[in-house]
Every structure is written in C-alpha cells, then in structure tokens.
Image: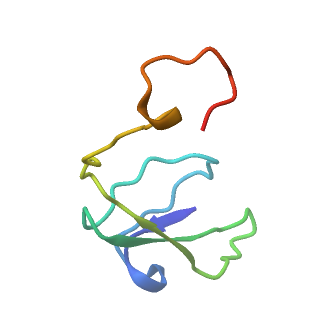
Amino acid sequence: MYVTNTSSCASDGEWEPYSLNREWKLSTPNTESSVYVKFRNNSGDISECISSSITHDDTPPTDIAIDIEGGISAVSSTNVS
C-alpha cells in the first residue's frame, strides 16, 4: 500500500506492506485533512488512489455541565433525565 497526504497519491509516500491499521501524521493540525492511499497486488497492478477526510481538533471542550433531575445531589432511581 502507498499512503500519503498528497492529492491523487502523486508524491510523498512509500510502498509498504498492507496493514489493517497504520499510524499516520496529519499534514495540518486543527483542520480537516485528507489521507490518500492506493494498493498494489502481487502482479504489480495498482488500484486507483482513494481518500478519506478527518477533522483534527485538539482543543478540549469547555463549560461542560451535566444536570440530572434538575440538579439534585442524589437520586435513588436508575431512570433519570
């Protein structure tokens, strides 16, 4: 397989053995990035370049609050809202 951040699998990747899982560094943090991959079989046939996008966000959420049953401190039921 050949994995890259470059559109159309045009450059910046290397052929490597196929794997179901692979760590990958996104090109730009805190934005939407695309990862591109193509595959080669034992006969040397190469697939089309395919891609998928992921949005990276390393900003933790703020002002998180959970209000159970209107803010009471304890409940005796497993059914709450």
Q: Nearer the viewer, residue 68 or 8?
A: 68
Q: Nearer the viewer, residue 66 or 18?
A: 66
Q: Quadrant of the C terminus?
A: top right
Q: Residue 50 appears at what percent x and percent y?
A: 59, 77
Q: Which residue in the rendered view is the most extreme toward the right? A: 43
Point 51% across, 65% down: residue? 2
Q: Residue 1 appears at what percent x and percent y?
A: 58, 62
Q: Is residue 68 above or below residue 37?
A: above
Point 43% across, 63% down: residue? 14
Q: Residue 3 appears at what percent x and percent y?
A: 48, 65
Point 42% across, 20% down: residue? 73
Question: Left or right: 23 with respect to 43?
Answer: left
Asked where in the image residue 71 lies, by quadrant, the reply is: top left
Asked where in the image residue 46 lies, by quadrant, the reply is: bottom right
Number of callouts in the render?
Answer: 0
Q: Nearer the viewer, residue 75 or 33?
A: 75
Q: Is residue 7 above or below residue 16?
A: below
Q: Nearer the viewer, residue 16 or 70?
A: 70
Q: Residue 75 appears at what percent x and percent y?
A: 56, 18
| Colour theme | rainbow
Point 65% across, 68% down: residue? 40
Q: Is residue 78 above or below residue 33?
A: above
Question: Left or right: 8 with respect to 47?
Answer: left
